[in-house]
């Protein structure tokens, strides 16, 4: 099944709440991203048919393969959510989140907290439930462990493989670290060598040098890029061609991203795009002034003019 999802060394877009929505995923697909994932969605919200959540499940026309990433603390609602996702023809797979480090998720009992030893039974039952109910490939995304030094990823990866998971995306930090410190590629490598299913390395991949470092140290099948793609969706092309994208091409990408936001969200997309423009202007000579102007812009025309005339790339 996995062989049909990608060929060669795959590049994934890792889910990132608030950023990797449909318009952003639409852009990265243009640059050679192989597999995209929805933002993390709670199975409870799917079951309750929350309109915002259902909109998050939508994909752009070129997003194939496309996985929906779910988070769960409830087996019954997991079953119902998977049965609903089975009906969506455009969903190519289901990814289970075992890595989210956000405090709200931890308190609610889903995401990275499921890597705690006390939650091992639920970890197993959740994977079983999804694999047994899903008519699509199932993957998981996790971290090295919960507390710093509590390295459980090898054990959990073996369990996931035995239960029928097709591949694993592994972030090289512990849940408690959030994004502090550096991703531990050596630990990812230990997991790669412990299972026969593909492992995708994730964490700190921001340019071609870090990509090569991650691949060489981990021996992973490919990489997943999350924060490294925010403000830099062309990173996938740069990794493919081993070089940088020029300023004017970047400008066209940003304009394309903005138009996709407006198309998807309507006028609200103008305001929602501000955080992306803040990211795009990071390191720009006039970044501070540009961001100030962005925060005052309220129309499509204003934003497009700012991107064309004020943003220095």
Image (cartoon, rainbow, N blue to C red):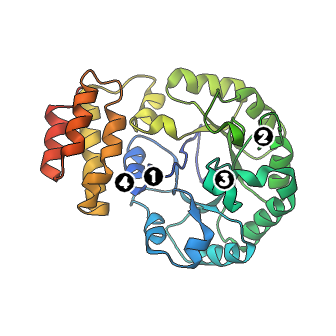
Note whether residue 140 is visible: no
Disc 2 to disc 3, C-alpha distance: 31 Å
Callout 1 crowding tier (Cα within 10 Å): few <14, some 14–19, many ≥20: few
Residue 256 appears left or right of 81: left
x and y, in percent, of residue 237 in the image: 42, 34
Residue under label 2: 147
Callout 4 crowding tier (Cα within 10 Å): few <14, some 14–19, many ≥20: many
Of badges 2 and 4, nearer the viewer stands 2
Callout 2 crowding tier (Cα within 10 Å): few <14, some 14–19, many ≥20: some
User: Tags 2 and 4 in contact by the CB under 8 Å rule?
Assistant: no
Note whether residue 13 is visible: yes
SS state under label 1? loop
Q: How many marks?
A: 4
Residue under label 3: 2
Residue 216 appears left or right of 263: right
Residue under label 1: 18
Q: Earlier in the sequence, mark 2 or mark 4?
A: 4
User: Tags 2 and 3 in contact by the CB under 8 Å rule?
Assistant: no
SS state under label 3? helix
Disc 1 to disc 3, C-alpha distance: 28 Å
Give the vertical position of 289 relative to 18 (above or below): above
Q: Earlier in the sequence, mark 1 or mark 3?
A: 3
Q: Earlier in the sequence, mark 1 or mark 4?
A: 1
Disc 2 to disc 4, C-alpha distance: 35 Å
Residue 130 appears left or right of 309: right
Please give the name of the residue rendered at 85% of the width and 53% of the height, measured from the top-left corner.
Answer: 159
x and y, in percent, of residue 175 in the image: 70, 42
Of badges 1 and 4, nearer the viewer stands 1
Q: Earlier in the sequence, mark 2 or mark 3?
A: 3
Q: Tell me the number on the disc at residue 23.
A: 4
Please give the name of the residue rendered at 65% of the width and 47% of the height, measured from the top-left corner.
Answer: 101
């Amino acid at each position: 099944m996995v062989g049909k999802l990608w060929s060669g060394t795959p590049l994934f877009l890792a889910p990132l709440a608030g950023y990797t929505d449909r318009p952003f995923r639409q852009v990265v697909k243009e640059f050679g991203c192989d597999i995209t994932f929805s933002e993390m969605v709670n199975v409870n919200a799917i079951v309750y048919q929350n309109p915002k959540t259902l909109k998050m499940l939508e994909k752009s026309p070129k997003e194939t393969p496309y996985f929906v990433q779910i988070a769960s603390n409830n087996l019954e609602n997991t079953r119902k959510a998977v049965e609903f996702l089975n009906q969506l023809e455009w969903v190519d797979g289901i990814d289970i989140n075992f890595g989210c480090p956000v405090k709200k998720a931890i308190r609610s009992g889903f995401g990275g907290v499921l890597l705690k030893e006390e939650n091992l039974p639920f970890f197993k039952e959740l994977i079983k439930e999804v694999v047994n109910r899903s008519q699509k490939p199932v993957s998981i995304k996790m971290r090295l462990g919960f507390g710093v030094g509590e390295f459980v990823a090898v054990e959990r990866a073996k369990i996931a493989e035995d239960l029928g998971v097709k591949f694993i995306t592994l972030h090289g930090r512990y849940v408690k670290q959030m994004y502090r410190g550096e991703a531990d590629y050596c630990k990812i490598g230990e997991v790669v060598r412990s299972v026969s299913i593909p492992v995708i390395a994730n964490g700190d991949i921001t340019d071609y040098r870090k990509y090569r470092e991650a691949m060489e140290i981990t021996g992973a099948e490919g990489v997943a890029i999350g924060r490294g793609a925010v403000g830099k969706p062309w990173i996938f092309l740069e990794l493919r061609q081993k070089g940088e994208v020029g300023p004017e091409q970047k400008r066209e990408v940003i304009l394309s991203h903005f138009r996709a936001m407006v198309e998807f969200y309507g006028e609200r997309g103008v305001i929602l795009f501000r955080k992306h423009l803040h990211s795009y202007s990071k390191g720009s000579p006039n970044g501070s002034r540009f961001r100030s102007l962005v925060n005052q812009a309220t129309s499509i025309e204003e934003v497009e003019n700012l991107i064309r005339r004020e943003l220095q790339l």
